[in-house]
Image (spheres, rainbow, N blue to C red):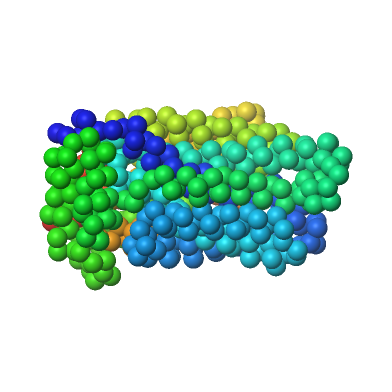
Amino acid sequence: MHNTTVNLRYIGFLSIVAAMGGFLFGYDTAVISGTIAQITTQYSLDTVSQGWYVGCALIGSIAGVSCGGYLGDRFGRRKTLFISAVLFSISAVYCMISSDFNQLIYARIIGGIGIGVVSIISPMYISELAVPQYRGMLVSLYQLAVTIGFLGAYVVNYLLMNYALGDAKDLQHEGLQLIFHQEVWRGMLGVSGIPAIFFFIIIFLIPESPRWLVMHGRSDKAQSIFKRIYGSENAAKAEVQKIQDVSSSEKKVDWKLLAQPGVRKAVWIGAAIAILGQFMGVNAVLYYGPTIFESSGISGGDSLFYQVIVGLVNVLTTILAVFIIDKIGRKKLVYLGVSGMIVFLVLIGVYFFWGAAWGLPSLFMLICFLAYVFCCAISISAVIWVLLSEMYPNAIRALAMSIAGLSLWLGTYLIGQLTPWLLDNLSPGGTFFLFAAMCVPYMLIVWKLVPETTGKSLEDIERHWIH
């Protein structure tokens, strides 16, 4: 098999560049947590306006994921990454210089559109150039970059707040005084412009997706890229021929392809696991972790510290997942991880309901919380973008990923809005029992309906759905 001579260093470089979109995604999503109190005070926000400030980027993400597939098919994966980098850059600068609350909302929506676009295109680009035996590891770099972006936002918020309370008061320039001392939230939101501009520049160094090139009749260019990946002219020709053989009847991107029974089934499965994954608690934990910790009796300062520990566990576990996803397999990781999630979600629920009566210490809840994050990060968080990027036919991969991505972002928005209500009305214990229950249909769908894609070429996976 020619894959044994693969230029992994080159593919790794291309994957890391594309995964930088995930870092911007993670940073732009998490940075909001350090600015809510400041924005609320400065603009005298009520609870509805505060919720709109937090949720407006998710609305932008829904818009971005809805058009991301079309842009990826129409202009190519690389050019669409350029578009997302421009959106991130504009959003960062606009947030930093916004003159009122409405302008800040517009800026956040622009950044949200970039998040939605990159959440589709980055993992898809990596999947389309990766070789089968390393594809899970390489696509997982995107999720790793997202978790690093989350952690990066927490660290930047912490450092800038300390700077604002200390040395920043000595800055002489009026504009710098405003950004880093008087209204430090501007600096927190604006810092993301630095990696966004770097992302824009470095995209010039990567080629277009070779599979997109083949689908658009540019096989010679695709062959030259595959030659650099495989190190052999014959292997490159064979790869192009394999793509052409599978997609010969699907030269044009067409909504009608979704009507094919196998393809339609794949799209429905992808959408189902995308939205179900959001109701298993992961984003509720990431967004409302401090609130949940405080409701367990942990003080506010400690709750923020524990949230940083949650972020660290998330990153370190994702690093582990990157190295084992191709060895253990997608489905086995889901079975192991989701089983663990159910156990620890139930234990957290038990703590909230009966912990005081049984004399359980808060350390018990913290350990269960971190164990849950570990199980989640090593399974559904690592696997979801890998599966969505590889389970659809070449001709409609971008379109199908947009549908699944739209499902995921709708779920994210809903859980962001519903979690406070659930915590109040079901109690924290009841909320965690609900999250545990939602894990069951997820595991059943993966068990019964999702094929094991580990080690298979994208064309082999496509044949599975079509035949």
- Pick the front one: 229 or 352: 229
Asked if residue 133 shows in the view, the reply is yes
Position in image of residue 1 (x %, y %): 14, 33
Q: Along the horizontal axis of the image, is 118 left or right of 365? A: left
Q: Is residue 295 in view?
A: no
Vertical relation: 321 (above or below) 416: above
Kindly give the residue lying farthest to the bottom in the view shown.
256
Residue drawn at (14%, 44%) of the image: 238
User: Percent x, y for residue 440?
Assistant: 38, 47
The image quadrant where one finds the C terminus is bottom left
Residue 237 quadrant: top left
Q: Considering only vertical position in the picture, is 263 above or below 237?
A: below
| 252 is higher (above) or lower (below) than 174 | below
Going 50% across and 50% down the picture, which residue do you hit? 200
Image coordinates for residue 90, horizontal then vertical, percent: 60, 58
- Give 319 or 353, whichever is nearer the viewer: 319
Q: Nearer the viewer, residue 94 or 189?
A: 94
Q: How many numbered marks, from 0 up?
A: 0
Q: Residue at x 66, y 64 (%)?
A: 105
Taking the spot 35% from the left edge, 58% from the top edge, the residue there is 76
Q: Is residue 190 left or right of residue 10?
A: right
370 left or right of 212 in image:
right
| Residue 181, image x, y percentages | 81, 46
Q: Is residue 160 left or right of residue 460?
A: right
